[in-house]
Image (spheres, rainbow, N blue to C red):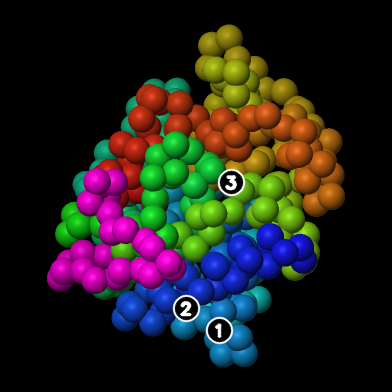
Amino acid sequence: MGAVLNELEAEAVFVIRETAAQFERPALLFSGGKDSIVLLHLASRAFAPAPIPFPLLHIDTGHNFPETIEFRDWIAQKYGVKLVVRYVQDSIDAGLVREEAGPNRSRNVLQTVTLLGAISELKLDACLGGARRDEEKARAKERFFSHRNTHGQWDPKHQRPELWNLYNGRKNVGEHFRVFPISNWTELDVWLYIQSRNVPIPNLYFSHDRPVVVRDEMMLAHTEFLMPIDGEHIETRRVRFRTIGDATCTGAVVSTASCIEEVIEELIASRTSERSSRADDKRSESAMEDRKSKGYF
């Protein structure tokens, strides 16, 4: 690896070890996407040859790509780590959240209630996540150790200073932290790391033929959860995904990149953010910050 990737890896490993040292019940938030996969790989390096000392926690919307769920189960077994799954459908059935209506309905926002319920149930005091500051303007405000109050809420004005790699994990009863070890990485850094370390990732990230519905200038995967409405039709296109989330709001991009080297070449030439293909970020100018303030990832 190059010097920059070595430095980023060392920084992330240090933050992961600090999390294990400062907190009693951490967990790694796992979506099945490339960032959480890289985070899982970094955790394995942080504690090798010992096993990873905390579980994976996946909040399943019920609208995931089948490939994501299959890969999630496989990689948890590969790394020998406990996988805990909590379901948005259970929150709906319990009356804690209400299913959205309309053609653009999504369960992505509903994950927050399920996540906060899981944190309370499992008594977690820190949740490691794969968010990066370059993803979105609200992410750019994050610290490595992101304090959350007793309601799981994030307030950028009440975060602790982080000087000289000193991280303050002090908290009151009922509060917790979200920890983001790869905050300083870019999308290109992630792919270069995947290439250098031979990190396995789902085939969704590579070019393939898929039936899609074009809606609001976005290509959304045609699934049983997303059907065409008046004026729309299903068409097969050669696409790949830059992010992997709830299938109802994760857009595809036209691409012929079928391997890591080609993805890297495509990214170098790209002038758009990877989250430009996320419909949930387009609901308002402050969509991400609004969700984070309520306890989102």
**Most foreground residue, 274 or 120:** 274
Q: CA distance from mark 2 to mark 1?
A: 8 Å
Q: Residue at x 68, y 60 (%)?
A: 4
Residue 29: x, y in percent?
45, 62
Q: Secondary structure at mark 3?
A: loop
63 displayed left or right of 234: left
State yes or no: discs 2 and 1 in contact (Cβ < 8 Å): yes
Pick whichever of labels 1 and 3 is earlier in the sequence. 1
Question: Residue flagged by tag 2: what amino acid is it?
Answer: Arg
Please state which of the two labelled residues, at mark 2 or mark 1, is closer to the viewer: 2
Prevailing secondary structure of the magenta residues: loop
Residue 161 position, x and y percent, is 32, 58
Disc 3 marks a residue whose amino acid type is: Ile
Q: Secondary structure at mark 2?
A: helix
Q: State the mark number for residue 244.
A: 3
Name the residue located 76 percent from the left edge and 39 percent from the top edge. Answer: 268
64 shown above or below 280: below
In this figure, which residue is indicated by the disc labeled 2? 17
**Is 169 drawn above or below residue 37 in the view shown?**
below
Q: Quadrant of the N terminus?
A: bottom right
The tag earlier along the polypeptide, 2 or 1, is: 2
Reply yes or no: does residue 155 show up in magenta: yes
Q: Is residue 201 left or right of residue 165?
A: right
21 vs 47, left or right, is left
Residue under numbered circle 1: 47
Residue neighbourhood size for the residue with mark 2, other residues' Cα within 10 Å, grouped as few (<14), some (14–19), many (≥20): some
Determine crowd level at label 3: few under 14, some 14-19, many 20+ residues with C-alpha closer than 10 A. many
Q: Which residues are magenta?
A: 154-176
Give me the residue at 54% from left, 54% from top: 184
